[in-house]
Image (cartoon, rainbow, N blue to C red):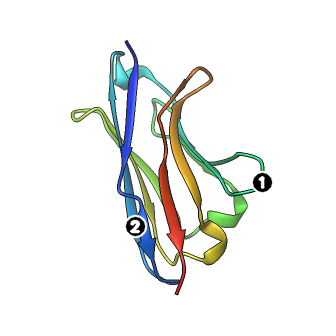
Amino acid sequence: QVQLAESGGGLVQPGGSLRLSCAASGFDFRFAAMAWYRQAPGKERELVAQISRFYTTNYVDSVKGRFTISRDNAKNTLYLQMNNLKPEDTAVYSCTMPPAYWGQGTQVTVSS
């Protein structure tokens, strides 16, 4: 069955960096469009970044220039490199093979 397992979240100071990973299994990762979403307390879930099977990427405006989504098809792994983190980036980050498959999520907290 399809499994998505995120890792790499944690507590970081403003201006810091984190790299999230999403290990995928149960499907042919090479042909899947993938995405990262986040949900902050009291807010709706929002799309952060997406990457196609052809490596085309798209980002929400608030993270452009700071976050980079990438994929390693040899490792069946999706990544989200997050630089210059801000307190408003605090959320649970989840990877997805849209629309049906989601990981459990990993908490990212940006605070001094």
Q: Residue at x 69, y 65 (%)?
A: 62
Image side of residue 36 versus residue 6, left or right: right
Image side of residue 112 versus residue 47, left or right: left
Indicate the quadrant containing the N terminus: top left, top right, bottom left or bottom right.
Answer: top left
- Residue 31 image label: none
Disc 1/disc 2 C-alpha distance (Å):
22 Å
Q: Position of residue 39 (x, y in %)?
A: 66, 51
Q: Position of residue 33 (x, y in %)?
A: 51, 29
Relative to 20, residue 22 above or below:
above
Outermost residue, front direction?
Answer: 42
The residue that label 1 is drawn on is 43
Q: Residue at x 40, y 31 (%)?
A: 4
- Residue 18 image label: 2
* Callout 1 secondary element: loop
Question: Who comes first in sequence, dot 1 or dot 2?
Answer: 2
Q: Residue at x 49, y 44 (%)?
A: 105
Relative to 30, residue 96 above or below:
below
Outermost residue, bottom direction?
Answer: 112
